[in-house]
Image (tube, rainbow, N blue to C red):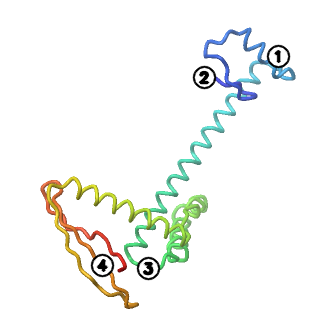
Amino acid sequence: MPLCVICGDKLANEAMVHSKLKRHLTLKHNHFANKPRSYFEGLLSEQKQQSAMLSKKVKVADKAQEASYLGTELVAKIMKPHTIAETLILPACSAIVKTMFGSEAEKEVRKIPVSDSTISRRIHDMSADIEETVCTSVKESEMFALQVDESTDIGGMAQLLVFVWYIHDVKIVNQFFCCKEL
């Protein structure tokens, strides 16, 4: 459904009669009634450019989110404090990108969210997703086996460790399932 380029009102349909368009213009936008057609075509063109620019910004934001998850995965794999992304990884990436591609590309790299709370939240989201995926795979499997063990952490607290074996795509999969404090 087409929109008025001035006010954004929804207009009846694509084949709206010229007289109805003119009536909308004179009733709602009387101060624009004497403008030439090229003025409105320019407004429409400007709106399309703004829409394209907004779409481009959204794509950049999506890439920044994806990069943030990739950085989070690296931090989780090396088991370092979450602040390492903010204090080491992002500054190193920024310096490398600035040297290789210039300051415009470096500005885009700086948009990647890597605060310690963001990293922590993303690790939690990824672990919940992995747990859900493993649970689904175990439920779909014909057979599975659990191995349960108790361990003690550095603070003397008892921990329950659970491993699961199951069949997935004719392969036996050995997966760490969870670690719960007793």
Q: Alpha-carbon distance for marks 4 and 1? A: 75 Å
Q: Report the residue marked by disc 4.
A: 160
Q: Indicate the quadrant where residue 3 lies.
A: top right
Q: Secondary structure at mark 1?
A: helix
Q: Alpha-carbon distance for marks 3 and 1? A: 66 Å
Viewer-side residue, 26 vs 173: 173
The mark closer to the camera, 4 or 1, is 4
> Which one is earlier in the sequence, the residue at label 3 or at label 2?
2
Q: Alpha-carbon distance for marks 3 and 2? A: 53 Å
Q: Amino acid at mark 2?
A: Met
Q: Residue at x 24, y 68 (%)?
A: 175
- Marking on residue 80: 3
Q: Report the residue marked by disc 1.
A: 26
Residue 12, horizontal then vertical, whole percent: 65, 17
**Horizontal side, residue 64 vs residue 11: left or right:** left
Residue 4, horizontal then vertical, whole percent: 71, 24
**Quadrant placement of the N terminus:** top right
Image marks 4 and 3: residues in contact by CB distance under 8 Å: no
Q: Amino acid at mark 3?
A: Lys
**Label total for image:** 4
Q: Residue at x 60, y 58 (%)?
A: 104
Q: Residue furthest left?
A: 170
Q: Alpha-carbon distance for marks 2 and 4? A: 59 Å
**Horizontal side, residue 152 vs residue 118: left or right:** left
Measured along the vertical axis of the image, is residue 46 above or below residue 135? above
Pointer 4: residues within 10 angstroms few (<14), some, or many (20+)? some
Q: Secondary structure at mark 3?
A: loop
**Horizontal side, residue 143 vs residue 36: left or right:** left
Q: Amino acid at mark 1?
A: Thr
Viewer-side residue, 89 vs 114: 114
> Which one is earlier in the sequence, the residue at label 2 or at label 4?
2
Q: Alpha-carbon distance for marks 2 and 1? A: 21 Å
